[in-house]
């Protein structure tokens, strides 16, 4: 549902605040050519969860959670098509064509270098299990075991109320965010080693991206799993090649 087409940044700020719990202080923007469109979709199963697609010209803004009503605790799950750089809790972000999650109980600064285009879900803490809330508040989304699936679903969602698949996709995202563990840690490194050994023996092309995709992980998540077991990708491949010389 289209709720806004505007060249008035104050009007845009008011909509983000009232509809999506995003009170923003604008730091930089081009007064002569600002434009934004905002489309939204309320999920049937989770009416507290709002999906929004925003297109806008370049801007830099600061979010301050003290402007929210007391007790309002949310995540902002976003897929950004264009370059978005930002900072929250001493973590620096630089995203393009990828997804990230922000804890809206903490301040952040964000900047679309050029035009911005994003799809996002505003998710109240209380619609997720407490373990998932703790996980998402303390780790980058790329560490989530189902990050790739979440990203794919979010990117493919739109605001067409007649397309029932959009509600299914949002429901699926909520279910996937509720899962924080899928691998058996005692076996995962063995499975990774066996996969690499098979590809080395068969002289197939293998790299970190191929390995991560085979286990439905992001590149960063795979690096994290390997480091938990005392390996890097390069060291593990070298160890396997040494054994089969």
Image (cartoon, rainbow, N blue to C red):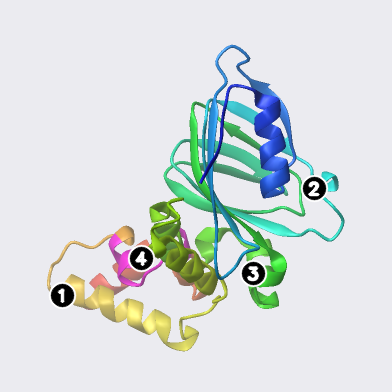
State the CA–CA distance, disc 3 to disc 2: 20 Å
x and y percent of residue 14 in the render? Answer: 72, 35
* Rendered-image quadrant of the C terminus: bottom left
The residue sitting at the left extreme is: 202
Q: Which residue is rendered at x = 49% and y = 52% of the image?
A: 99
Label 3 secondary element: helix
| Residue 238 placement (x, y as % from top left) | 30, 67
Closer to the chain start, of discs 3 and 4, is 3
Residue shown at the point (57%, 20%) measured from the top left: 34
- The residue carrying mark 1 is 201
Earlier along the polypeptide chain: callout 3 or callout 2? 2
Q: Residue at x 65, y 32 (%)?
A: 12
Residue 219 visible somewhere in the drawing: no
Local SS, label 1: helix
Q: CA distance from mark 4 to mark 2?
A: 36 Å
Q: Are marks 3 and 4 in contact (CB under 8 Å)?
A: no
The residue that mark 2 highlights is 65
- In the rendered view, does 6 fall on the left or right side of 119? right
Q: Which residues are magenta?
A: 210-223
User: Could you tell me residue 26's position as x and y percent?
Assistant: 71, 28
């Amino acid at each position: 549902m289209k709720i806004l087409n505007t060249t008035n940044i104050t009007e845009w700020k008011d909509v983000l605040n009232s509809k999506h719990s995003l009170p923003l202080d604008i730091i930089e923007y081009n007064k002569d050519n600002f434009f934004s469109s905002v489309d939204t979709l309320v999920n049937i199963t989770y009416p507290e969860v709002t999906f929004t697609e925003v297109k806008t010209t370049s801007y830099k803004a600061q979010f301050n959670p003290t402007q929210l009503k007391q007790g309002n605790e949310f995540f902002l799950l976003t897929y950004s098509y264009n370059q978005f750089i930002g900072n929250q809790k001493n973590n620096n972000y630089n995203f393009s064509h990828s997804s990230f999650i922000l804890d809206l109980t903490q301040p952040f600064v964000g900047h679309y270098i050029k035009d911005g285009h994003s799809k996002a879900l505003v998710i109240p803490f209380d619609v997720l299990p407490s373990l998932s809330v703790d996980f998402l508040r303390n780790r980058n989304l790329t560490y989530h075991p189902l990050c790739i699936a979440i990203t794919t679903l979010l990117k493919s969602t739109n605001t067409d109320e007649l397309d029932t698949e959009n509600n299914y996709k949002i429901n699926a995202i909520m279910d996937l965010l509720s899962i924080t563990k899928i691998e058996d840690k005692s076996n995962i490194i063995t499975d990774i080693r066996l996969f690499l050994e098979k590809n080395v023996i068969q002289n197939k092309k293998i790299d970190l991206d191929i390995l991560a995709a085979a286990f439905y992980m992001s590149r960063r998540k795979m690096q994290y799993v390997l480091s938990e077991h005392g390996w890097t990708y390069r060291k593990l491949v070298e160890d396997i090649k040494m054994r089969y010389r």
